[in-house]
């Protein structure tokens, strides 16, 4: 076993171990009721944001493409999940919530994955900020289209209409235009969220360390060199982009089914930016970092509730300060010197690398 | 002798203790939930401030119930509202005054239905807010009723037959009113000649106004809040287009926008339960106190929340809520009490049935010389 | 007639996008960063001008100058405090800082001016309407278009002729080499921010003259659209920003007028995607040749 391989293994084990430990601690807190209502209510959303952050990291950190439309895939997943769950309940009377949830998550992932592939084919020809703006555009297009989409179920079959609501009498509406996905029966559970995180970690970590992953990273670090080595750049970028879209769709389905309603305005450009913040703060290419920063940044505004009106202000200031402190070379080298003995212990676990 | 004195002392103490108990008002812990930051902060701050004015008044009065107001911000977001709701309960709230906006209220109300927590929303007006839930009650009209009432008013008063509708198709409030308005307009023989939409991000309304103008609309129905409406009025004035603009309760507030040229709103009609410039004693009292405290003229949202505090106090008295009760216990008692009380508020006389929707009468006002005039 | 009317509306909206896009493109071209807070500087500029007109009773020109001065100071401060420490950092780190700055400005504005919308008072900019037959053209439209042309020409001349402008182009081309040639990179970037922010103040006043509603979030959506416009025209290119902005506005209005108001935004973004697929560096962007 080479040193690099061993380091990778340790990093992966630490990542899984931390996630599993956190899950076990939280479960025991739920069991003996020491958890606050507020934290308990955030568990499923935290799972969703972790999956979103890790999957976006696959696109940004590993494959080196700036995507600003990740929330669009999440919304596809959320809507698909809500429709599938509602359809199964209304048309087939599937009462088993776990079965409905799992099927909905799979469907959400498949739909978002297909869409990701369709978008990826043209988009991945572009580079840098142009790719960013096109993903942004796709996110906004998805949002405007969903705004005028109507899906209902009657007589056991799904009915679709677009722009105008054209449904027979007695149709149970599942997606109702601007009202979003309505009357969802919330069925998401923390355990399923945890399993989804594990699946995401498994997929992403394996992809990074596979042959395809090496090709993707080679492309990121130097596209021209990779191309001249005969690596089919677009193919590998497609793999990363589609996988990330599918994972975002699964997170979306879990997210949608955690609430009684989902609206298009939840998945705006700002939401994509939020996930981007998780990824950058956690470190590009650093999967464990994404997990931690997604968790902390989801909980942070809730912790800041004590500041009431000033909390979004506090959030903004914290964000700016953290970015400056972690990225300024002077401060960084100072901190490094301060922590160098500890750092030496952990340096082995560092994966990937920052791209400039 | 000594013994007797001691006994008398004890009796005295007991009596004063009992008297103190009877006089001591019960303090309810009520959580206001609404967007106090973000794009919808305007509405959340209005309901919060309205409620604060009422709480200050109530706590200074000799009412048997005092209220301790807890405030939680939901950012007008369906995910964050659940956090706000949980944080409110963690902070010891017994019931919720909120949430301010419809979609978050639908989500939080559904969670409250499962947990058995009582909601009284000042301003969430979508029918989905109360549908399938016995724990949520509304203070404002619901959207379908407003659409219905507007179409009936236009038809009954022969304001015109060619109508243009401009609505926000990304907004539940706007689409909710529009849907019943269009349906009822067809019944009343009104012709919809132009129908155009916009979203929260729209700043340019020239296409929408031009479409109404080119199709010869005599009435432009604006089921929306006053912010986009003020832009529409401006564009129409630029284009020399002067139909009758007919608004709904969200239009109230347009006259008190800082810097707004009120001549643009000349002749605008709207159905609303509250206008800040009314001269009755209650409104004047509220508006004065509100302006003193926050330096702004209150909008309808603030008035609804102000009423909300008094409604909660009245229902709590009817239900016999005590400070020690858990939210679950409070919920069922309040649901029963809400259906028995009748409240005379700033926004009219209100009663409720088991659906949770309010019954009160809207009033039509016309803006003349920068003032609302009721007929 | 209706067509002409729509065209004028499109030009009017487009020139607003263009003027905001100029600011984006300036900063991007020289500092190589997406200044997400640009839209919010516009908002601040509009608020300052509003206060000048409504509360302090200043004449419009003075109010605009005051707003430009305050925005310039704000721009330099933001650059110095938040962006300069990150000069060597990854571009994404700067992007996130800019996003944080955008949140910060919005929330500070919420605290200072409150959540209630303000209506931008009429000034000489939008006080008259020209009538050409049945056509109605607001003076705001005419002034915005003129302002655009003046700004574009003077920016082009500035970067081509003056010493500072040349320094800017050098920094844009190769920051390291510029530094070696004795150009003060930090000062050049500060000046860029100063100019960009002063432009933002003008854009804020013009935006609110055409669409007179002012809220803490006023700058964000026009900011995103203008950013799109800058990319559309080829980011970094001054004429490109102008062209991209105007085209975006016209497409948006035509899409809404002739296809559907529901799908207006979707159409804008769809056209953008098609253009970028055909011409991946935007309309007037120069393809960068990569050296191996």
Image: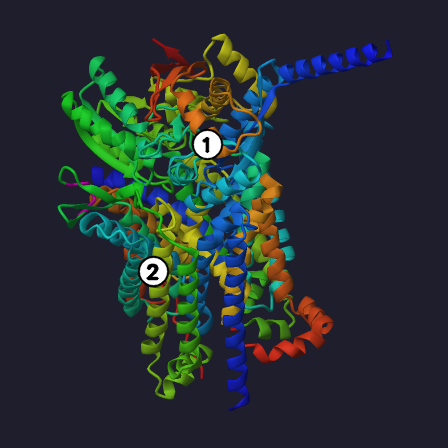
Q: Quadrant of residue A164?
A: top left
Main SS of residues in magenta: loop
State yes or no: residue A162 in magenta: yes
Image position of A296 (left or right of B157): right
What residue sits 51% from the left and 81% below the top?
A9
Numbered circles on residues, count: 2
Would residue C156 be visible to someone looking at this image? no
Q: Quadrant of residue C244?
A: bottom left
Chain of residue at mark 2: A
Q: Which residue is under mark 2?
A: A249
Residue range (magenta): A161-167
State yes or no: residue A147 in magenta: no
Label 1, secondary structure: give it.
Answer: strand
Placement of C224 over or under C88, stated as above or below: above
Q: Quadrant of residue C128?
A: top left
Residue B272 x/y as whole percent: 37, 19
Placement of B151 over or under C284, stated as above or below: above
Q: Which residue is under mark 1?
A: B98
Residue C246 x/y as whole percent: 35, 50
Report the coloring of the rendering: rainbow
Q: Residues within 10 Å of mark 1 (few under 14, many from 20)?
A: many
What residue sits 50% from the left and 42% below the top?
B86
What residue sits 64% from the left and 52% below the top?
C77
Residue A263 x/y as whole percent: 35, 45
Q: Pick whichever, C118 or A11, lies toward us.
A: A11
Image position of B189 (left or right of C177): left
Q: Pick whichever, A261 or A130, lies toward us.
A: A261
Placement of A159 over or under B336, stated as above or below: below
Gap in Å between the C-alphas at discs 1 and 2?
32 Å
Chain of residue at mark 1: B
Residue B119 x/y as whole percent: 44, 31
């Amino acid at each position: 076993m080479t040193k690099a391989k061993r380091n990778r293994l340790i990093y992966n084990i630490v990542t899984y171990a931390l996630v599993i430990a956190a899950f076990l601690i939280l479960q025991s807190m739920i069991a003996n009721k020491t958890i606050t209502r507020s934290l308990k209510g955030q568990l499923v959303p935290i799972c969703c944001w972790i999956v979103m952050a890790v999957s976006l990291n696959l696109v940004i950190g590993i494959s080196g493409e700036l995507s600003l439309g990740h929330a669009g895939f999440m919304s596809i997943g959320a809507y698909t999940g809500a429709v599938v769950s509602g359809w199964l309940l209304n048309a087939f009377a599937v009462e088993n919530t776990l079965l409905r949830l799992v099927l909905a998550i799979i469907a959400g992932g498949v739909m978002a994955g297909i869409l990701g592939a369709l978008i990826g084919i043209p988009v991945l020809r572009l580079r840098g900020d142009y790719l960013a703006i096109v993903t942004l555009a796709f996110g906004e297009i998805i949002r405007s289209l969903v705004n005028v989409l109507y899906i209902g179920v009657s007589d056991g079959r799904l009915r679709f209409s677009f722009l105008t609501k054209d449904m027979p009498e007695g149709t149970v509406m599942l997606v109702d235009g601007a009202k979003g996905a309505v009357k969802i029966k919330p069925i998401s559970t923390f355990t399923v969220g945890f399993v989804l995180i594990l699946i995401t970690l498994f997929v992403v970590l394996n992809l990074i360390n596979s042959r395809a992953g090496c090709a993707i990273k080679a492309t990121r670090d130097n596209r021209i060199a990779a191309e001249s080595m005969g690596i089919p750049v677009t193919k590998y970028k497609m793999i990363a982009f589609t996988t990330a879209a599918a994972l975002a769709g699964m997170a979306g389905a879990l997210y949608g089914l955690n609430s009684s309603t989902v609206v298009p305005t939840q998945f705006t450009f700002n939401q994509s930016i939020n996930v981007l913040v998780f990824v950058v703060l956690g470190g590009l290419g650093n999967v464990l970092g994404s997990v931690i920063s997604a968790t902390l940044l989801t909980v942070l505004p809730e912790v800041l509730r004590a500041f009431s009106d000033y909390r979004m202000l506090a959030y903004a200031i914290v964000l700016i300060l953290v970015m400056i402190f972690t990225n300024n070379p002077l401060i960084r080298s100072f901190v490094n010197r301060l922590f160098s003995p500890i750092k030496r212990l952990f340096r082995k676990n560092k994966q990937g690398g920052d791209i400039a | 002798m000594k013994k007797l004195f001691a006994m008398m002392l004890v009796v005295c103490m007991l009596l004063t203790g009992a008297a103190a108990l009877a006089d001591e008002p019960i303090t309810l812990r009520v959580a206001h939930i609404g967007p106090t930051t973000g794009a919808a902060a305007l509405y959340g701050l209005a309901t919060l401030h309205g409620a604060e004015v009422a709480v200050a008044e109530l706590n200074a009065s000799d009412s048997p119930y005092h209220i301790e107001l807890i405030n939680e911000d939901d950012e007008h977001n369906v995910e964050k509202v659940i956090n706000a709701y949980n944080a409110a309960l963690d902070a010891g709230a017994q019931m919720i005054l909120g949430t301010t906006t419809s979609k978050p209220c639908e989500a939080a109300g559904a969670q409250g239905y499962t947990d058995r927590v009582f909601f009284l929303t000042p301003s969430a007006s979508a029918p989905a807010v109360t549908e399938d839930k016995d724990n949520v009650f509304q203070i404002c009209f619901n959207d379908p009723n407003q659409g219905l009432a507007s179409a009936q008013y236009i038809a009954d008063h022969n304001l015109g037959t060619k109508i243009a509708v401009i609505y926000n198709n990304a907004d539940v409030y706007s689409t909710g009113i529009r849907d019943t308005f269009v349906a009822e307009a067809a019944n009343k023989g009104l012709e919809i000649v132009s129908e155009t939409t916009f979203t929260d991000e729209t700043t340019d309304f020239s296409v929408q106004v031009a479409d109404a103008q080119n199709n010869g609309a005599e009435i432009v129905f604006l089921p929306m809040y006053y912010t986009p409406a003020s832009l529409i009025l401006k564009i129409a004035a630029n284009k020399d287009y002067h139909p009758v603009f007919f608004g709904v309760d969200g239009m109230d507030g347009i006259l008190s926008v800082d810097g707004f040229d009120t001549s643009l709103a000349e002749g605008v009609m709207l159905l609303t339960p509250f206008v800040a410039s009314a001269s009755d004693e209650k409104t004047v009292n509220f508006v004065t106190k509100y302006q003193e405290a926050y330096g702004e003229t209150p909008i309808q949202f603030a008035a609804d929340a102000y009423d909300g505090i008094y409604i909660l106090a009245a229902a709590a008295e009817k239900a016999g809520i005590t400070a020690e009760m858990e939210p679950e216990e409070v919920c069922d008692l309040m649901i029963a009490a809400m259906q028995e009380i009748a409240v005379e508020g700033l926004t009219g006389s209100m009663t409720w049935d088991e659906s949770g929707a309010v019954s009160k009468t809207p009033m039509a006002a016309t803006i003349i010389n920068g003032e609302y005039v009721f007929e | 007639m209706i067509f002409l009317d729509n065209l004028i509306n499109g030009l009017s909206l487009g020139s607003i996008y263009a003027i905001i896009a100029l600011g984006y493109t300036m900063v991007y071209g020289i500092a190589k960063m997406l200044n997400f807070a640009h839209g919010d500087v516009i908002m601040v500029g509009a608020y300052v001008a509003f206060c000048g007109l409504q509360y302090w009773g200043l004449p419009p020109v003075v109010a605009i100058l005051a707003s430009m001065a305050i925005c310039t100071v704000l721009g330099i401060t933001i650059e110095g405090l938040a962006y300069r420490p990150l000069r060597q950092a990854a571009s994404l780190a700067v992007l996130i800082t800019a996003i944080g700055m955008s949140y910060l400005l919005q929330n500070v504005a919420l605290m200072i001016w409150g959540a209630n919308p303000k209506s931008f008072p009429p000034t000489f900019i939008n006080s008259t309407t020209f009538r050409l037959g049945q056509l109605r053209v607001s003076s705001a439209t005419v002034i915005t278009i003129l302002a655009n042309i003046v700004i574009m020409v003077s920016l082009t001349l500035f970067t081509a002729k003056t010493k500072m402008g040349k320094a800017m182009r050098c920094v844009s081309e190769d920051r390291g080499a510029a530094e070696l040639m004795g150009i003060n990179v930090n000062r050049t970037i500060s000046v860029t921010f100063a100019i960009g922010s002063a432009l933002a103040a003008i854009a804020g006043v013009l935006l609110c003259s055409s669409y007179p509603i002012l809220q803490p979030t006023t700058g964000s959506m026009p900011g995103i659209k203008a950013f799109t416009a800058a990319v559309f025209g080829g980011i970094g290119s001054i004429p490109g920003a102008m062209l991209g902005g105007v085209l975006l506005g016209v497409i948006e209005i035509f899409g809404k007028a002739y296809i559907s108001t529901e799908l207006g935004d979707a159409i804008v973004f769809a056209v953008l995607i098609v253009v970028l697929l055909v011409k991946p560096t935007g309309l007037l962007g120069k393809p960068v040749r990569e050296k191996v």
